[in-house]
Amino acid sequence: MTTSLDEAPAMTPGERVATGVLADIEAGRLRPGDQLPSEPYLQAAYGVGRAAVRSGLERLRRKGLIVTVQGSGSFVTDPKGCTPPMSATGRMLHDIREGIAKGTLKAGDQLPKEPELMATYKLSSPAIRAALRELRQEGLIHSRGRHGRFVGPEGTQVRREATKGEKLAEAIAAQIRDGRYMPGDCLPGEVALAEQFQMSRKVVRAAIALLQEQGLVVTVAAKGTFVKEREES
């Protein structure tokens, strides 16, 4: 006994999505490597909810017809086995994870600063922070406030890049050690040091503060900053 079309069981919403996307693949409207439309688009196109879209895509994944890349989306599989494209966020996460796995990023290494990551991956600051938060939750990196982000979980000994103030302080300290500035000599003022080293006055002030902490100089109000006498060992 044959069953008429009217008696055929109705498809579930998820099956309807899967059937529609499969038809697009078979007709060539979606080719290998192509990214599938977003979930909101599929919801509107098939008049179904989010759960139905996900159910339909899961059916296609089980059949090996599509693959989903976290942070990138779902793509039609390529019979030749080519890797589907990644989003900029996915590429950044992949690069950092791979760097850690291969050892090119070692425990304690400082990650590139946010502006550098933004320029490299063409991502916004919120997108960068969200991706790095994911790596932090995985225990792959940790943050040290204004000093930046470092490879490894909290407590890992770090090797961070020196700040501009630290670099300037070391440059001035080297001049003191070499005898360019002798004990009792007055260092050039903030403006002169800023021009000499092409740094801002804020960086100069930070460098002077570090030299004071190291006991190399002393600042006298309204007079200037002077090289301290060397203590006898």
Image (cartoon, rainbow, N blue to C red):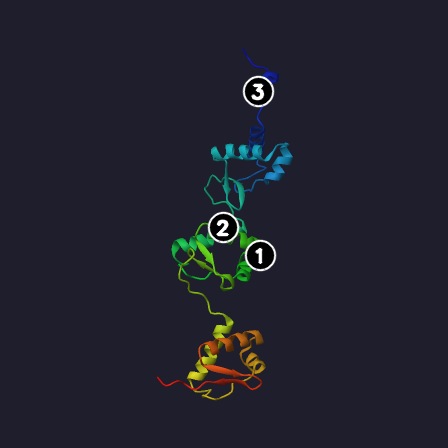
Q: Which amino acid does label 3 sit on?
A: Pro
Q: Nearer the viewer, mark 2 or mark 3?
A: 2
Residue at numbered disc 1: 125
Q: Distance between the residues labelled 2 and 3?
A: 44 Å
Q: Distance between the residues labelled 1 and 3?
A: 50 Å
**Residue 126 visible in the shown view:** yes
Q: Which residue is drawn at 58% across and 76% down?
A: 201
Q: What residue type is labelled 2?
A: Glu
What label does residue 9 carry, if any?
3
Q: Which residue is drawn at 48% across and 75% down?
A: 210
Task: Report whether 92 appears left or right of 108.
Answer: right
**Residue 63 visible in the shown view:** no
Residue farthest front in this picture: 221
What label does residue 11 carry, if any?
none
Q: Which amino acid does label 1 sit on?
A: Ser
Mark found first going from the N terminus, 1 or 3: 3
Between 209 and 61, the residue placed more toward the observer is 209
Give the structural element (helix, strand or loop) at label 3: loop
Mark found first going from the N terminus, 2 or 3: 3
Quadrant assignment for the C terminus: bottom left
Q: Residue at x 50, y 54 (%)?
A: 132
